[in-house]
Each structure stands twice: as C-alpha cells, then as structure tokens.
Image (cartoon, rainbow, N blue to C red):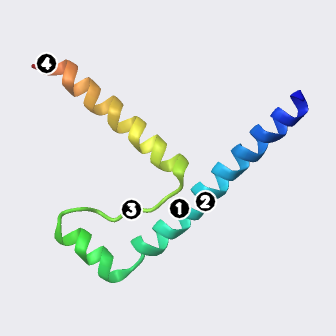
Amino acid sequence: MAQDAMDGVRKFVHSVAVIVATLNKGMHEIINDTAFQKKLIDQGIEPMGGTPDELAKRIDNEVKQFGQLVKQINLKVE
C-alpha cells in the first residue's frame, strides 16, 4: 500500500514537471513572436523568456530589493 502511494506521488510530480515544461515551451513561442513582442514593448513591457527556475530567482531578487526599500523608507500599509 505504501509503495502504491509513493508511485502516485512520483507520477504526480512527473506530471507537474511535464505540464510546466509544456507551458514554458508555449510561452516561449508566444514571447518570440515579433508582433507580440511589439505589443509588449509598446506598453512598456520588456519581453523576457527563461526557465521556471530563472523566473523564481528573478522574483526572489525583486522581493529582496523591494523589501529593503520598503524598510528603508519605512513604508506602512494602512
């Protein structure tokens, strides 16, 4: 029974990885489209691709940077 549960977990983890890879591939196809890039640039958005890990690192860095700024200027939520 425990082996069945572990097999289920492994299959789930593999399925999630396949889904993320498929979505990432599709996003790259869209981001690399010249017309789509122009629409983003016209709105002041820089088209960026990358891996899910790179995105996680970018978000982590921005949270740290803005967190430091919030503390530095003593920003409070009302």
Q: Nearer the viewer, residue 72 or 49?
A: 49
Neighbour class for label 2 at 10 Å: few (<14), some, many (≥20)? some
Say what amino acid the circle numbered 1 marks. Answer: Asn
Image disc number at residue 76: 4
Secondary structure category for the residue under label 1 = helix
Task: Provide the residue designation for mark 1.
Answer: 24
Q: Residue 53 location in percent, x, y? A: 54, 47
**CA separation in Å, label 4 and label 1:** 36 Å
> Which numbered disc flags the more N-terminal residue, 4 or 2?
2
**CA separation in Å, label 3 and label 2:** 16 Å
The quadrant of the picture occupied by the C terminus is top left
Q: Is residue 44 above or below residue 63?
A: below
Say what amino acid the circle numbered 2 marks. Answer: Ala
Secondary structure category for the residue under label 4 = loop
Task: Provide the residue designation for mark 3.
Answer: 48
**CA separation in Å, label 4 and label 3:** 31 Å
Say what amino acid the circle numbered 4 marks. Answer: Lys
Task: Provide the residue designation for mark 2.
Answer: 21
Say what amino acid the circle numbered 3 marks. Answer: Met
> Which numbered disc flags the more N-terminal residue, 3 or 2?
2
> Which numbered disc flags the more N-terminal residue, 4 or 3?
3
Q: Is residue 7 above or below residue 41?
A: above
Pointers 3 and 2 in contact (CB under 8 A)?
no
Which residue lies most toward the bottom here? 35
**CA separation in Å, label 4 and label 2:** 39 Å
Neighbour class for label 3 at 10 Å: few (<14), some, many (≥20)? few
Q: Nearer the viewer, residue 40 or 12?
A: 12
Pointers 1 and 2 in contact (CB under 8 A)?
yes
